Image (tube, helix red, strand yellow):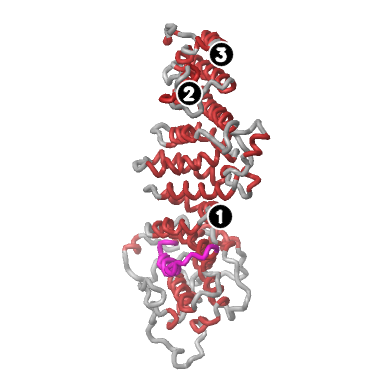
Amino acid sequence: HQKHNVSGMKAKSISSLVEGVIAKRKNANDLVLIIENITVTSKASLVLEAISGAHEIFVHLFESDNVSLQPDSDKCVTTTEKYKAWTNEQYHSYFDCLLACFAHGDQSVRKSALETCAKIIQCYGYYCCTSAIRLSVPEELVKKVTKCLLLQNECFDELLQLLIREFFKYGDIRYFVMRSLSTILSDVYNVDDQQKNNCLVLLESVTSLMPKEDSACLNSYILAYEKEIRDKFMTEPPFQISQHRKRFGQMWLEFLKLPLSGSHVKRVLVILHASLVPNFSQPRLLADFLINTYNRGGGLSLLSLHGLFVLMHNYNLDYPDFYTNLYTLLHPRIFSTKYKARFFHLLDLFLSSTHIPSYMVAAFVKKLSRLSLIAPPHSINTMVNMILNLMRRHPSIRHMIHCTDKEHATITTDPYIENEKDPALCKAAESSLWELHTLKHHYCPKIAKLASAKSLGTKETDIHENLEDNYKDFFDEVVKKEFKEIPMNYTQPNTLFFGQEDETMNLWTGI
């Protein structure tokens, strides 16, 4: 073995070592010295030179068939076989050094390390495919890269974005990353929030790039430069959309088994109905996650019901408690939540079917009416319009505002049980919407006018135009309105509260 002072080696000497290794096999030990310079603590210029030089050597070794693709040192007899097994060991050592450089302090080194990992995976995979009847890719190396980027304590967001931007456009890379991630997540239990966030960033990116048809899967990175070889493997799983969806579903289901924070669950639920469900080969497997999420309460309950509604409507999921759970979400706190507009949008969507039992519709109408008594004006506007729309869709509950049965035309006590969680037992259909009659005397003219409508008509009102309204919008609308007659107080007041004596009397000064 030639001895070199590795720590003092300069970048410019590496090029001569590379030339020597490529020129003669007797200089092969210099490859070890080159690889030893690829460390986190080494100078950036030296590491970059070593990465480039080692890559050049391994490309030469693969081209000259001097790397054993399936090494078994116990069966190596000849010198050539032992040499090929040794170069394979150095190949994996080189790969591990590149992974370690993901944490290097220099950005150019980190970027070069990831790009070179991809190149040598491509090189290894290509030469495996030239002598194989099936597509062969070093999946263990793909798994190492994926695990290093996702499950280390360091934040590799920059490299993660590079992987997504440069390599996820290739169908085979995307497929093998999904398969490796499924295995990684099934084997880990203690994952911190940073690691979960890294996983979710990767999953969201894969989701946004999922192909819609087989032709979108044909872009290969491993076989990018050899069309004839690539065409031979086009029937393999990495190039079939059905297999992509299978791996996609497995990957997401493994991630959803982790103990996720509320913010992570919300990110999943926001994209679930539009992006996850269409790309799952078996979308109904998401039902358990959605039901468990509903039980967490709050805004997550509403978003989970949206996912369940999609599964029920499009994939025949049987979930009989859906409307019962939706009914329990009707609570005064919805008026002060950030998701109020989304809540009423989804509530209108969920109640759009004309096949909902009349007792169920009556329960929702009655609950909305009762809430309208304590709701802010801009929310009352939405709720009253929703009530009227439900009346138009379901004529069978119109007796709640116009009872023709003289025996039940007068109700002395309201039979409706407000605190009953089961809409089938709340007796809403036996009640009336006296709350709407009360709103005719609301202080806001717009609400009073809306509640005083002479007839329902048949045309539904679009509630979505005013879902985002707030007090300011409502106030500005009233201020801009021009009045022909303005009520005046013609009697000059002497007190603030019409003569009732209290502490405010001392603060009042008449005009």
For marks 1 and 2, give the CA distance. Answer: 42 Å
Label 3 element class: helix
Q: Position of residue 275 (x, y in %)?
A: 55, 52
Q: Is label 1 in contact with label 3 (beta carbons under 8 Å)?
A: no
Query: Farthest bottom residue?
Result: 406
For disc 2, the neighbor class at 10 Å (few under 14, some 14 to 19, many from 20) is many
Q: Nearer the viewer, residue 477 or 365?
A: 365
Q: Amino acid at mark 1?
A: Pro
Q: Is label 1 in contact with label 2 (beta carbons under 8 Å)?
A: no
Q: Amino acid at mark 2?
A: Asn
For marks 2 and 3, give the CA distance. Answer: 16 Å
Which range of residues does the magenta coloring cover?
Answer: 314-334
Label 1 element class: helix
Residue 315 in the magenta stretch? The answer is yes
Q: Quadrant of residue 504?
A: bottom left
For marks 1 and 3, give the CA distance. Answer: 51 Å
In the picture shown, does residue 511 fall above or below 258?
Answer: below
Q: Nearer the viewer, residue 505 or 45?
A: 45
Residue 458 in the magenta stretch? The answer is no
Task: Return the mark for residue 278.
Answer: 1
Of callouts 2 and 3, the N-terminal one: 3
| Quadrant into which the C terminus falls | bottom left
Task: Return the mark for residue 88.
Answer: 2
Q: Amino acid at mark 3?
A: Ile
